Image (spheres, rainbow, N blue to C red):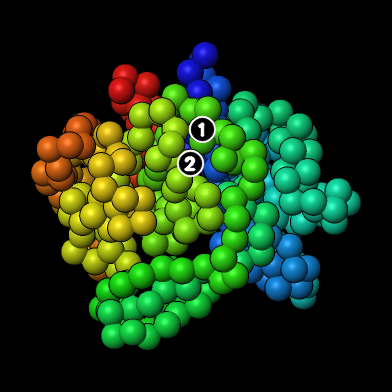
Amino acid sequence: MQKIVVIGGGTGSYTILRGLKNHNIELTAIVSMMDSGGSTGRLRDEFGFLPQGDVRRCLLALSPDTGMLRKLFEYRFSRGVGLNGHNLGNLFLTALRDITGREEEAIREAAKILNIKGRVLPVTTTNCQLGAILENNQVVVGETNIDIPRHDPELKIKKLFLVPKPRAYNETIKAILAADKIIIGPGDLFTSVIPNLLVGGVVPAIKKSKAKKVYVCNIMTKYGETTGFKASDFVNELEKYLGKDVLNYLVCNNKKPSKALLEDYQKEKAEYVEPDLVSKKIRAVKTDLLDNIDLARHNPEKLARTIMKL
């Protein structure tokens, strides 16, 4: 059975996992552990545990579509002094972490309860923070401060770092080395994708793995992170951390969203990512991956079918 490893976090991982779980494969999600905003950030500050948000999304993506259990895990409290804004799934995972005493054990127990197809692994079990050095050498620390910039969003991100410098979780390295395909992305380049590559041991394992290495490019840019980026810019930035000549494939959407949808995104200063020529050494697969919803996102099944054909 084909072994596919997905590296990322956030909505991007949720989308791709939803599609891939319907295929006859051995599936592993490797999840970024640097989130510091919202309910996740509050719980992280209060308990000192690793962030739960991206783990929760991946567990949900790989769980059967049973309706009520999914609704419970996604439920967000809208009132209550202590509960307002908290996500029930995050609270559930925090409780499991408190009971089991280990992050990875809590994820395993949650996976059993949700009866997921595949595995969810933290990229690291070290509690660390994401930082960015901007083009004016200003330093920003905290994933949420990069994701929702308080600094001038016109400033480009020059370099990312983690403090303290973490080592990868052992099972994560094993999964990468055993993979037939490694899928990086989609997702916010600087806050969901690249942070995984900063963890000690991850990049050497990707390079050593005999797997086909695939990058799934975003459909839209993100103001304050990837303003004005084309597909080649995403790849160039990724290669600063991954290294040159590591990627085998670029998967890119080539269907432009509707004019009305693009106008909605322009309000947030987000633009369509042009699928330009990247590199002769990377095989570019450009196809219609657009979902038929009121958001410019990948269709899970279209994306999964494309990946399975590689």
Q: Quadrant of the C terminus?
A: top left
Instruction: Kindly indicate the quadrant of the structure image that contains residue 181.
Output: top left
As shown in the figure, which amino acid type bears the numbered disc 1?
Answer: Leu
Badge 1 density bin: few <14, some 14–19, many ≥20, Cα 10 Å: many
* Residue 32 placement (x, y as % from top left): 54, 53
* Residue 11 placement (x, y as % from top left): 47, 49
Q: Is residue 42 above or below residue 294?
A: below
Badge 2 density bin: few <14, some 14–19, many ≥20, Cα 10 Å: some
Disc 1 and disc 2 in contact, CB within 8 angstroms: yes
Mark 1 or 2, nearer chain start: 1
Q: Residue at x 59, y 61 (%)?
A: 166
Q: Which mark is residue 177?
A: 1
Dot 2: what SS?
Answer: helix
Provide the residue designation for mark 2.
205
Q: Is residue 127 above or below residue 102?
A: below
Is there any visible trace of residue 140 in the rendered image?
A: yes
Dot 1: what SS?
Answer: helix
Instruction: Kindly indicate the quadrant of the structure image that contains residue 171.
Output: top right
Q: Residue at x 56, y 33 (%)?
A: 175
Relative placement, left or right, of 258 versus 175 is left
The residue closer to the viewer here, 107 or 256, is 107
Q: Residue at x 57, y 66 (%)?
A: 165
As shown in the figure, which amino acid type bears the numbered disc 2?
Answer: Ala
* Residue 307 placement (x, y as % from top left): 35, 27
Relative placement, left or right, of 274 versus 178 is left
